[in-house]
Image: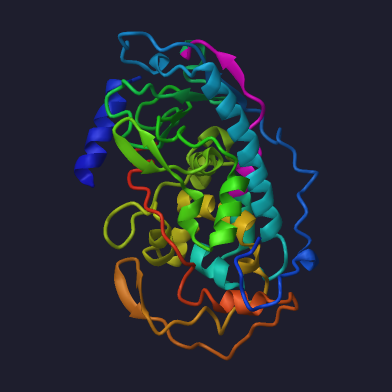
Amino acid sequence: MRAIAHSVVSFLLSFSLSLPPAAEPPLDLSSLDLSAFSNLDPSIQAVNIHILAGTPPNPLNGNFDDEKCSPAQVTAIRNGIVDARNMATGAIALLKPKDMNKSNGFFWIFGGSTVDPAIITKHFSFVLRLGTADEITSTKKYENSKTDLIFTCIPPTAPKATSAYANTQNIGRQKSVLNLIRLSPTGLANTESYTIAAARVKTSGQIQDGFPVKQVGTLSVPAPPLAFTIVHEVQHADPLMDNPATDHLVDEKGGTGARAYGFQQIMHELSKDQKARNPQNYAFFGLLAASNPELFVPNCYIGDAPLSLAPLLIAGRLRMQTSLGPDTCHTTVPGACAACKKIIKGIPGDVKLPNFDPDST
């Protein structure tokens, strides 16, 4: 992993550049008030959003102005921003009900009832600060401007172009003079709405069905919806945060030493504190909020945490998770108790996304 990270850093420097069939009754979530927040203001913070547009030079010049987006990519990014805002709004709505952190789903994604949903909500609110993007043809005038954030498209001919899904740069971190969200060919491979991905996950019950395999050059890769990637990258993007010194998140490493990008990784290899700090946990929660909100129904848990006699790998240490109390599923939502009991050992399915974003600053 260190060698891979070194190669990607070298690249960056060189660029200085409906529900599945089940016996339980259908869930009625109307009592949870999951309506979207109509009063969320996308202009909470004055950040100008741009897309670097045009045709990449041939040959490449070796700087960030090489990373121009085609008209189709510009459209995809604009749609992706709107989609990411919708994903964040749905996640915030699901986080709103009292005691939703006392749910098996919240335990697996964010660590359980001792984690304050308000902290999670805050990080999703940063996504809502992505406004309408204009097109620019050069990054030069935005150097050292902390209120400008630029989306770019790494050309497929660039060295290491497919070594990561995306990369975020921030002014003042690793000597960067630009705020960038850089999307690679793999990061742009799936432009469908996250709602389509969520519908497939809902039908199959398997998270991997939200990530269709796409051919990118010579590689076949699971491709997340662009909204998923943007939600992740926003957690690295300083201009969108209240206080970058405390709000900026980095990709956490699991017990194996690899950064936690895969679905089973983010559930089983991170400690409670790491889960609330790992950008990929936010992206997966946003998708699950749309596909399986029943997993996050308030007061649907067992004991102080979900139970499992199977060992869990938490931050590299094997431990047994045993019974901490009686069945405390007190929700009145029909079918929710059965749904949360099904994930006592974890949410099913897996998708591995190695090197999703190894060198964001």
The region drawn magenta spans 123-139
Rendering coords of residue 159 (x, y %): 27, 24
Position above or below: 266 against 237: below
Q: Give the residue furthest to the top.
A: 58
Instruction: Identify the residue at image location x=71%, y=60%.
Output: 96
Which image quarter: residue 289?
bottom right
What residue do we see at 19% from left, 41% from top? Answer: 3
Q: In the drawing, does residue 270 fall left or right of residue 79?
A: left
Residue farthest to the front, as pictured: 21
The question of residue 284 being in magenta is answered with: no
Taking the spot 58% from the left edge, 91% from the top edge, the residue there is: 326
Q: Position of residue 89 (x, y in %)?
A: 68, 47
Say left or right for 195 vs 32. Answer: left
Q: How is the image coloured?
A: rainbow
- The residue at the far left in this view is 3
Residue 1 versus residue 17 in the image, above or below: below
The answer to whether residue 202 is seen in the rendering is: yes
Q: Nearer the viewer, residue 276 or 331?
A: 331
Residue 29, picture quadrant: bottom right
* 268 or 194, nearer to the observer: 194
The quadrant in which the C terminus is found is: top left
Q: Quadrant of residue 33?
A: bottom right
Pick the front one: 178 or 200? 200
Tally the numbered discs: 0
Q: Nearer the viewer, residue 57 or 109?
A: 57
Locate residue 307, reporting x and y percent: 48, 82
Task: Left or right? Give the position of 14 relative to 335.
Answer: left
Position of residue 194 in the picture relative to residue 86 (left or right): left
Using the image, determine if residue 253 lies above or below residue 70: below
Q: Is residue 286 visible?
A: no
Q: Residue at x 50, y 17 (%)?
A: 70
